[in-house]
């Protein structure tokens, strides 16, 4: 069975600085997706970034980028130029390709951005 | 705004009662998913419907049931409620299943409090 582990329950960063959130996962699959979702105080789950396991290039979305290490089963999220609006819970998630019902979430990291 | 609408936003009820949560997917999305987010269990997949048919089941209790109607909206029915059912219930939708471009769009959730 697949598992997703986020070992940092809480993180904080000063505005304009860079922060990295960690995520590791365990799977025997070779093809899968990895995601980072953001859940702000509004509670909505917002997709931040997605990585296909068959792609070697790390995904980037504006200030958000990932460091995908397939062999190490590691998928960290880097937020550059942190903004107050980045304050939220961040969830790492795993999904087997062709199996959208198997979206497995980590326990989340609460990120606080300070002015 | 993800385009997925969930009602009600908040629901307070007593143990033993029955409630219905409603979800309207994004226009054009055929697949609806229900997730439960609780403090002790984290985010867990409950059930998925595709174009009116049940597609996949996750950790859904027998006291819970769901359906997707011809207009593609979905309802999650929770009966014989217990204190432990208190949670945030998310609905998500996507265009179809088994797509390499699969993306899930989440609603804002229904916060259920069982007293």
Image (spheres, coloured by chain):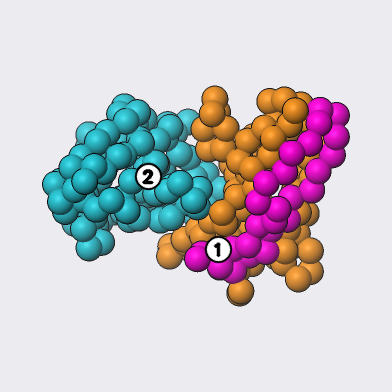
Chain colours: A cyan, B orange
Q: Of residues A44 and A35, which is closer to you in this image?
A: A44
Residue B22, compared with residue B64, is above or below; it is below
Provide the residue designation for mark 2: A88
Q: Are marks 1 and 2 on the same chain?
A: no
Coordinates of residue A65 in the picture (x, y in percent)? 21, 53
Image position of B78 (left or right of B104): right
Coordinates of residue B78 in the picture (x, y in percent)? 78, 40
Provide the residue designation for mark 1: B94
Q: Residues within 10 Å of mark 2 (few under 14, many from 20)?
A: many
Disc 1 secondary structure class: strand
Q: Which residue lies most toward the bottom here?
A: B28
Q: What chain does badge 1 belong to? A: B
- Please state the extent of the stretch shown in magenta in the rendering: B1-26
Image position of B106 (left or right of A94): right
Count of marks overlaid on the render: 2
- Is-magenta flag for residue B7? yes
């Amino acid at each position: 069975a697949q598992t997703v582990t986020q070992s940092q329950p809480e993180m904080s960063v000063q505005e304009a600085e860079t922060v990295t959130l960690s995520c590791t996962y365990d799977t025997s699959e070779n093809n899968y997706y990895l995601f980072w979702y953001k859940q702000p105080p509004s509670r909505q789950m917002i997709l931040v970034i997605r990585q296909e396991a068959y792609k070697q290039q790390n995904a980037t979305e504006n200030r958000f980028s990932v460091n995908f290490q397939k062999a190490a089963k590691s998928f960290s999220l880097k937020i550059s130029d942190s903004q107050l609006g980045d304050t939220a819970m961040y969830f790492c998630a795993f999904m087997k390709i062709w199996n959208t019902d198997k979206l497995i979430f980590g326990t989340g990291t609460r990120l606080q951005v300070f002015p | 705004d993800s385009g997925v609408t969930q009602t009600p936003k908040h629901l307070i009820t007593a143990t033993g009662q029955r409630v219905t949560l409603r979800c309207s997917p994004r226009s054009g999305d055929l697949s609806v998913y229900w997730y439960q987010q609780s403090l002790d269990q984290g985010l867990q997949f409950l059930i998925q419907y595709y174009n009116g048919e049940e597609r996949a089941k996750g950790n859904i209790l027998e006291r819970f049931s769901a359906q997707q109607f011809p207009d593609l909206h979905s309802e999650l029915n929770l009966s014989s409620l217990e204190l432990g059912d208190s949670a945030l219930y998310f609905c998500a939708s996507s265009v179809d299943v088994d797509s390499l471009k699969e993306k899930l769009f989440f609603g804002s959730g229904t916060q259920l409090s069982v007293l």
